[in-house]
Image: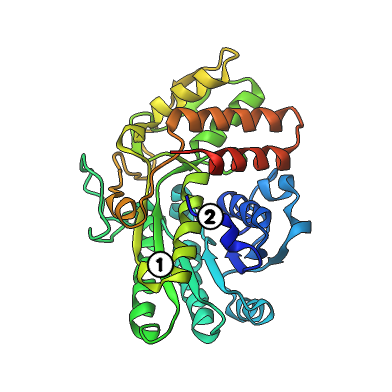
Amino acid sequence: MFNLSFYKGKKVLITGHTGFKGTWLCKILVNAGAEVTGYSLEAPTTPNLFSLAGLENNMNSVIGDIRDFKHLYEVFDATKPEIVFHLAAQPIVRESYKNPRYTYEANVMGTVNLLECVRHFSCVKSVLNVTTDKVYQNNEWCWGYRECEPLDGYDPYSNSKSCSELVTHSYKNSFFTDKEIAISTARAGNVIGGGDFAVDRIIPDCVRAMEKGELIGVRNPYSTRPYQHVLEPLAVYLMIAGKQYEDITYQGYYNVGPDESDCVTTGKLVDLFVQHWGDNASWENQAETDSPHEANYLKLDCSKIKNVFGWQPRWHISECMEMVCRFSKVWLTGGNISQEMDSEISEFFDKEN
């Protein structure tokens, strides 16, 4: 595991810091002693993890729109970041069908704006653009997609992230070949974990059902996804950004997903949730016949990142669900969320493979 002490004293900018993954990433970096600046819209849900974690007092939190180049440029100028994590996005597939124009503006032009800023600030040494496993042209194959497969997401969200990858490739080739700035993209699978309150995501749906004492409704119980705990890809993002900061030859395009055995159907995932939750929790199939298209079968081949960095997943799917249920029960009983996050971060990074 990459040593987080690398980040002590480093100036780090995170776009999308008020979101689910962004908040967990901020928490890790603040704990590691980094000087963290976040640039994001207000947290998209109420409740939200960023507020529950009380992070605003421990970092420089800037509320701004990734589509606003002038404001973003001013933040770069004021903070002079060394390392940039780009997470800001419209991240929901179903929402992208409702608001495709906004989805493309945020996910494509947002990437352009970020890389334009990077192009003008020599203080930046390492950039990681976080995209998604859905960037690939999905043929519903039974094997995982590799980094060399065609990029052509189907729905507006997935396709906008494919475009974000292409924008990154173009900027690297056009503007950074003669500069000592390492730029990578990371294509992660479906992340789960405590503190996700988004709509149209299966784990938040499960927790909301438990809060209300209802059956869990599952829209796509037979779809297979590369589910992984949120700390898994975040640890990889931190490793890539740190390694390429020290050695630019590590820059590249990386899949980040679970082992084959952890690519399960959504129905199996909810079975595990019910098992770990207890209290007579149960679910029902609420498949929709006229819902917008979503992939049925999607897996990643992560051979590249395992070979380059020697990385291996730490928490398998049952352990992930144990942590999800533990965190969610802390929240539902009014427990200390910041303390629970610290505990899970410590357990994850201290675990031996």
Q: Residue at x 72, y 46 (%)?
A: 53
Relative to 178, 212 lies left or right: right
Q: Which of 254 and 293 is in front in this view?
A: 254
Q: Which amino acid does label 1 sit on?
A: Ser
Way the structure is coloured: rainbow
Q: What element carries label 2?
A: loop
Residue farthest to the top?
280
Q: In which quarter of the image is residue 258?
A: top left
Q: Name the residue under label 2.
A: 3
Relative to 66, 130 lies left or right: left
Regarding residue 184, the answer to whether it shows in the image is yes
Where does residue 232 sit, x and y in percent of width and height? 47, 45
Where does residue 97 sit, x and y in percent of width and height? 43, 53
In this view, 104 is above or below 227: below
In this view, 150 is above or below 301: below
Q: Which amino acid does label 2 sit on?
A: Asn
Relative to 215, 159 lies left or right: left
In whole angstroms, how far apart are the C-alphas of marks 2 and 1?
A: 19 Å
| Residue count near mark 1 (Cα–Cα under 10 Å), binned few <14, some 14–19, many ≥20 | many
Q: Which of marks 2 and 1 is in front?
A: 2
2 or 1: tag closer to the N-terminus = 2
Asked if the residues shown at circle 2 and circle 1 are in contact, with their CB atoms under 8 angstroms apart, the answer is no
Q: Which mark, by number, is residue 184? A: 1
